[in-house]
Image: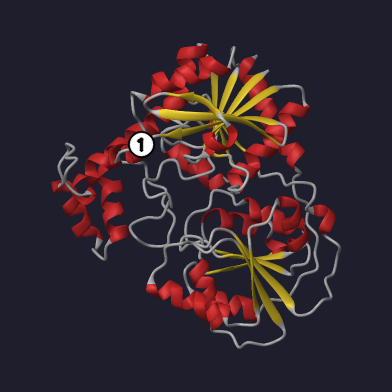
């Protein structure tokens, strides 16, 4: 079977959860005898590092091998505000067609892991023009139907499951970025123009841009033969937006086998070890966690390990929180780790904190924490809440965005010393391969 995996990013030093997932899937498929190529967005200087593979007025591409996986890295030379929202540029399709014809004699299946200007509907259109009736599988790693990318409703930390609609989603966008009440934001969206005015601010063009985003999501739905999801909540979201349940597979994440190997039973070491391993952003609840921890007395009974990079752009309040946190002896700052090293760290933890303030679609780190023997404190929202019930014997939930609630959960924490089964990555990937084969038979 000849397979293309198209994803947001696949650069060795910039792996997030979905990139780790794609690498594992590609390796599994290749070991099973299938021909796999990953197409992914890369930084502008990637072709200088790995050699130029293709270039025209719209894209510049490189070709390299990462952990024995063939990768074609694509960089878009420019993108307008309209294209960022609508994820479409008709002129890109001939460029992607030329790129595919250069490298692929033919493919059987295309598996989409992101919907961006380079990796989503434009790529699907190009692949179908080059390879005919190629089958398309789409994985819902990120909120594909939410223009704000958080699946929150009306500016509040609560999950959204409405059917996408230009008026509703524009109003929600306005409410989320202002302090305006729902009634006023809804009135404003109704008077915004339906046409696009490039010289005017985004706020003035918002209704048009949201409409384009929703139109692109509709295209993605119509072009996808089968969906792979990681939570039941996302399944409900897609079905509410017109996707047939027969074309959906909900499969829990499988974890790399390096994680269970570090689960060594009761962890008698003191202090209690807590860990946060994610992007240090507001939507990930990072600053709520810092606020909660700084409200605790500095003692030798607990320690917080922060794994990730501090973002370059911070508000004044965020800078102050980080400065205060760096003065604490009960906090360690750790750079992002490869999977094997992360497994070793989590194997020493009593608790992993996942304080997300967005609707997670089924966070991989939750499964990794459980597999490594750690307990979890997570926000009672979205995929975190769902996995909190799935792993209820090792999880405590707190009110998302509420530092007092999180602080209480940390103070009340007692390590469970329980082991729970977690699906292995190979079992997960076998389910994916079964989907591929059923589509092609």
Please name the residue shown 42% across and 34% down the image.
Answer: 76
Residue 393, relative to residue 128: is it above or below? below
Is 194 placed left or right of 327 in the picture?
A: left
SS for callout 1 = loop
**Residue nearest the viewer, comparing 303 with 396:** 303
Residue behind mark 1? 78
**Residue nearest the viewer, comparing 254 with 344:** 344
Residue 297, relative to residue 248: is it above or below? below
Q: Position of residue 72 (x, y in %)?
A: 57, 29
**Residue nearest the viewer, comparing 383 with 213:** 213
Q: Position of residue 342 (x, y in %)?
A: 72, 57
Please name the residue shown 63% across and 16% down the image.
Answer: 440
Please name the residue shown 63% across and 55% down the image.
Answer: 387
Is 44 placed left or right of 51 in the picture?
A: left
**Residue nearest the viewer, comparing 296 with 167:** 296
Residue 139 appears in the picture as rendered: no
Q: Quadrant of the C terminus?
A: top right
Q: Position of residue 251 (x, y in %)?
A: 64, 40
Q: Quadrant of residue 271?
A: bottom right
Residue 171, relative to residue 411: is it above or below? above
Q: Position of residue 102 (x, y in %)?
A: 53, 16
Q: Quadrant of residue 396?
A: bottom right
Please name the residue shown 68% across and 56% down the image.
Answer: 337
Q: Residues within 10 Å of mark 1 (few under 14, many from 20)?
A: few
Task: Identify the coloring.
Answer: secondary structure
Residue 411, relative to residue 6: is it above or below? below
In the rendered picture of this protein, how many numbered marks are placed on residues? Answer: 1
Residue 314 appears in the picture as rendered: yes
């Amino acid at each position: 079977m000849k397979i293309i995996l198209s994803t947001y990013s696949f650069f060795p030093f910039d792996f997030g959860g979905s990139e780790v997932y794609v690498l594992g899937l590609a390796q599994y498929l290749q070991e099973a005898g299938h021909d796999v190529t990953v197409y992914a967005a890369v930084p502008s200087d990637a072709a200088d590092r790995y050699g130029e593979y293709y270039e025209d007025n719209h894209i510049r591409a490189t070709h390299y091998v990462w952990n024995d996986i063939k990768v074609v890295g694509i960089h878009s030379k420019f993108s307008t505000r309209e294209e960022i929202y609508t994820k479409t540029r008709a002129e890109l399709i001939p460029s992607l067609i030329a790129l595919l014809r250069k490298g692929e004699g033919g493919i059987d299946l295309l598996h989409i892991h992101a919907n961006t200007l380079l990796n989503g509907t434009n790529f699907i259109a190009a692949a179908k023009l080059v390879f005919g009736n190629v089958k398309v599988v789409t994985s819902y790693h990120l909120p594909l139907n939410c223009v704000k990318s958080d699946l929150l409703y009306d500016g509040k930390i609560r999950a959204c499951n409405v059917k996408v609609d230009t008026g509703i989603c524009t109003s929600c966008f306005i409410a989320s970025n202002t302090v305006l009440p729902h009634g006023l934001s809804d009135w404003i969206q109704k008077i915004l123009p339906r046409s696009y005015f490039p010289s005017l601010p985004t706020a003035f063009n918002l209704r048009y841009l949201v409409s384009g985003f929703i139109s692109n999501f509709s295209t993605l739905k119509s072009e996808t033969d089968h969906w792979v999801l990681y939570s039941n909540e996302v399944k409900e979201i897609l079905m509410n937006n017109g996707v047939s349940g027969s074309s959906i597979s909900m499969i829990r994440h499988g974890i790399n086998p390096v994680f269970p190997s570090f689960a060594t039973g009761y962890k008698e070491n003191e202090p209690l070890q807590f860990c946060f391993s994610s992007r240090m952003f507001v939507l990930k609840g990072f600053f709520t966690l810092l606020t909660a921890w700084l409200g605790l007395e500095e003692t030798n009974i607990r320690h917080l390990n922060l794994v990730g990079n501090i973002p370059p752009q911070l508000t004044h309040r965020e800078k102050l929180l980080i400065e205060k946190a760096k003065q604490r002896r009960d906090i360690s700052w750790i750079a992002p780790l490869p999977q094997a090293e992360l497994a070793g760290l989590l194997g020493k933890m009593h608790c992993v904190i996942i304080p997300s303030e967005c609707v997670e679609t089924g966070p991989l780190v939750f499964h990794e924490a459980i597999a490594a023997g750690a307990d979890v404190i997570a926000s009672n929202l979205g995929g975190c809440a769902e996995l909190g019930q799935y792993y209820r014997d090792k999880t405590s939930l707190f009110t998302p965005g509420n530092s007092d609630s999180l602080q209480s959960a940390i103070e009340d924490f007692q390590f469970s010393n329980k082991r729970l089964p977690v699906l292995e990555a190979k079992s997960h990937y076998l389910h994916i391969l079964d989907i591929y084969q059923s589509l092609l038979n």
